Amino acid sequence: MAVVRRRSPLDPYPVTPKYLATRNSALHIPPAQFSNMKFKSDEVYGIVIDIPMGNTVMASMVCFINGAANLYFNNGGEYTGASTKYKSVVQAARNLVVNATALKQTCKRTSQFPLPVAGMHYIYMLTKRGIFKAEINPQTVYMDTREKRVVYHLYQQVMGALRVAQLRDAENLPESGAQA
């Protein structure tokens, strides 16, 4: 019988090449992609949040100022396109991105994009002036700064909107309030 070593919380998550390529692409989407939208050079136009979801599963939630929101999983899975069908996803994603600028003001610029360990959530905020990083520990976020608590709450709302959209897609249901 094979002995399976338990994964330590300090071990890196197993990832596929597809996941790494997609995450890297999201981290380097240029602001020119959103040239039809007005935002200042120090305002966040995109956000990539690495969220551990268990011992072996991690998701990267990617949101942009235009309301696009997608999930990419370390095993190569993904959930994309919900923002083209669901206003609730667009609203939640835009709200997150717009409000992330307050958190960005307290963060340092980075050019390193490691994957999280020990249950931490890593937040990368994209601006015309570079990428800024924050870390949130979901177990102690209630004791953290107001800016971190707000962003944490807002990305939980995006995650909830994506989950509802995913369930509606699975059942072929329209968005709440939409005509069938």
Image (spheres, grey):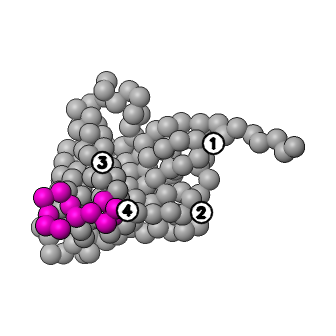
Task: State the image coordinates of residue 138 (x, y, percent, origin top left).
Answer: 39, 33
Mark nearer the N terminus (3 vs 4): 3
Q: Is residue 106 something that shows in the picture? A: no
Label placed on residue 160: 3
Span shown in magenta = 168-180
Element at label 1: loop
The residue at which mark 4 appears reads as 170
Few, some or many C-alpha atoms within 10 Å of disc 3 (few <14, some 14-19, many ≥20)? some
The residue at which mark 1 appears reads as 11
**Which circle, 4 or 1, is nearer the viewer?**
4
Q: Nearer the viewer, residue 178 or 57?
A: 178
Q: Which image quadrant for residue 102?
A: top left
Task: State the image coordinates of residue 146 (x, y, percent, origin top left).
Answer: 22, 32
Measure how far apart labels 4 and 1 are at the Cα level. Answer: 34 Å
Mark nearer the N terminus (2 vs 4): 2
**Which circle, 3 or 4, is nearer the viewer?**
4
**Which circle, 2 or 3, is nearer the viewer?**
3
Measure how far apart labels 2 and 4 are at the Cα level. Answer: 25 Å
